[in-house]
Amino acid sequence: MTTLRSLARQAVRIGAAAGLASLGLAAVPQAAGASTYTSISGSGSSWASVALDQWSSNVRQNGLVVNYNPDGSAAGRQDYINNQVDFSGSDPPFRNGTDELGGTGAENAGKYGFSYVPDTAGGTAFMYHITVAGHLITNLRLHPLTIMKIFTGTITNWDNKQITRDYGAQLPNLPITPVIRADGSGATFFLTRWMEHLDPSLWNAFCRRVHPGIRLPCPQTEFYPPNFGNAKAENGSTNVANYITSSYGNGAIGYDEYAYALNSHYPVVAVANPAGYWTLPKASNVAVALTKAVINETKSSVNFLQQNLDHVYTFRDPRSYPLSSYSYLIVPRQARGTPAPPLEFASPAGKGRSLSTFIDYFLCAGQAHIAELGYSPLPLNLVKGGLLQTDFIPGHISGPNLRTLAGCANPTFTNGILTLLKNAPQPSPCQKVGEPLNCVVRNGKATTPGSGNSGNGKKGHSASASTGSGITGTTGTTGTTGTTGGQVTGQVINLAASQSSQVPLAVVTALGILAAVVTPPALAAWLRRRRRA
């Protein structure tokens, strides 16, 4: 099964790479001359950088040069304030108040107006490293409150009873090392915002311990406090992943965008959602969750144009991943009462044309293969919000019709009608909270091996190695973890039963092939509309 999965993933990636190549060739009109597009530059979010780099590569071969430096969200916003870049990538918005945990104050957003444009969506994933007898555990599942207690120093060992209840098996006596970000991080912002809403009293108690005298309620922060328990602070997403996957990282768990776990080939925690299902930060789960994201459209609000994820956290769709969020591009905005932007931005052949073309591309056709990079396609509500703000960029080109979105080749909707909630796959019955680790699906119902019926299988809760506990990965729902004495490489896996895993795998493969077939006509239509504009 592992071999089949690996081959299928490789086939999908090859198909996606071909599709991305075709996107790059067709997405932007061929330059009629050197002045058709003006090069633009940005800096900021490392969370979004994998996608931004891919999109920049796609459009560069057609004359549109987009340079991006992933120096972190906080640094990117400061670059924008200092007028050193044409746009900034940031996961959090500009700070409009004091962050006592981070020791930072409000940010003056600069001389010119700005808008927030959604660019990449994804799930905050919890990559971990628990090795038992030379084998990597790959099927860990935890409730949200358990995760919060780990990252606030309340739960400190993997043999904790609450972890045992969540997981369904006893883990070894192994100290937990929470790996946090040492730098200003969007991943930290997303995690702490979620925890602040999940259990305010626990979050406030943690803040008082690590920062005595702090004013309450304690807010979310970009700068995670390092002075608790066995916490290890690392600078940047890559270093977090490197620590967890290292030989000395046994017992570690960290948080970051799912793309980094995917690239590391290490497992992530399946999180219980409000509907009572174990969910992973896969593309469809994140996209479903973000249909409940709201963009603040109240111009008088200090949070104007910012994302509100409150309803994402509580969405009761069985497919929803609760820690879903999206990153922004911060772009110039010409609005009433703001100073005129630099001439080079407002000129017809200037940077506004280049930036709005780039945004139009990545909100529509650029989302088609984003799942292969570890992200999720932006759903209809966020695409409309982004295109609306693009129309305020000085010197922008005309975008798609916001009512029909005709020609916008985003995979979550068709001609302005959301199809995601109808088409996204439902979870396996074995992903229901309460089902044992050795659960399998028979006749569409959850059961346990050898039970001969379709009960909930709770008798198998001890989950010995021989029934697929994730320690040996021989027969259960979790896949293979390696061999004793050899190098252990984790698999990011679905908790669905092994018997049913071939079906979604076939669907993914078919969708990859289908996308390669249908993408060029959609992009051709997009290209014709761009040329008319």
Image (spheres, rainbow, N blue to C red):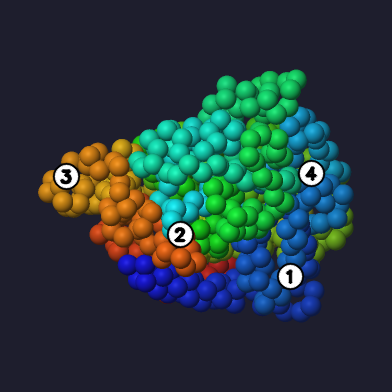
Considering only vertical position in the picture, is 37 above or below 390?
Answer: below
- Sequence-wise, the earlier of marks 2 and 1 is 1
Residue shown at 55%/42% (left/top)?
176
Q: CA distance from mark 2 to mark 4?
A: 56 Å
Q: Are marks 3 and 2 in contact (CB under 8 Å)?
A: no
Mark 2–mark 1 CB contact (< 8 Å): no
Q: Amino acid at mark 1?
A: Val
Q: Residue furthest left?
A: 452
Which one is in front, 423 or 148? 148
> In the figure, residue 104 lies in which quadrant?
top right
- Label for residue 134? 2
How far apart in space, not on screen, are marks 3 and 2 (Cα)?
A: 34 Å
| 212 to the left or right of 463 | right
On the image, the x and y values in percent for residue 73 come to 72, 49
Q: Earlier in the sequence, mark 2 or mark 4?
A: 4
Q: Nearer the viewer, mark 2 or mark 4?
A: 2
The residue positioned 70% from the left and 38% from the top of the image is 226
The amino acid sitting under disc 2 is: Gly
Q: Secondary structure at mark 3?
A: loop
User: Mark 4 sits on what residue?
Assistant: 113
Closer to the eye: label 2 or 1: 2
Give whichever of discs 4 and 1 has the lower sequence position: 1
The crowding category of the residue bearing disc 3, from other C-alpha atoms within 10 Å (few below 14, some 14 to 19, many at least 20), is: some
The C terminus lies in which quarter of the figure?
bottom right
Q: Does residue 321 appear left or right of residue 495 in this picture?
A: right
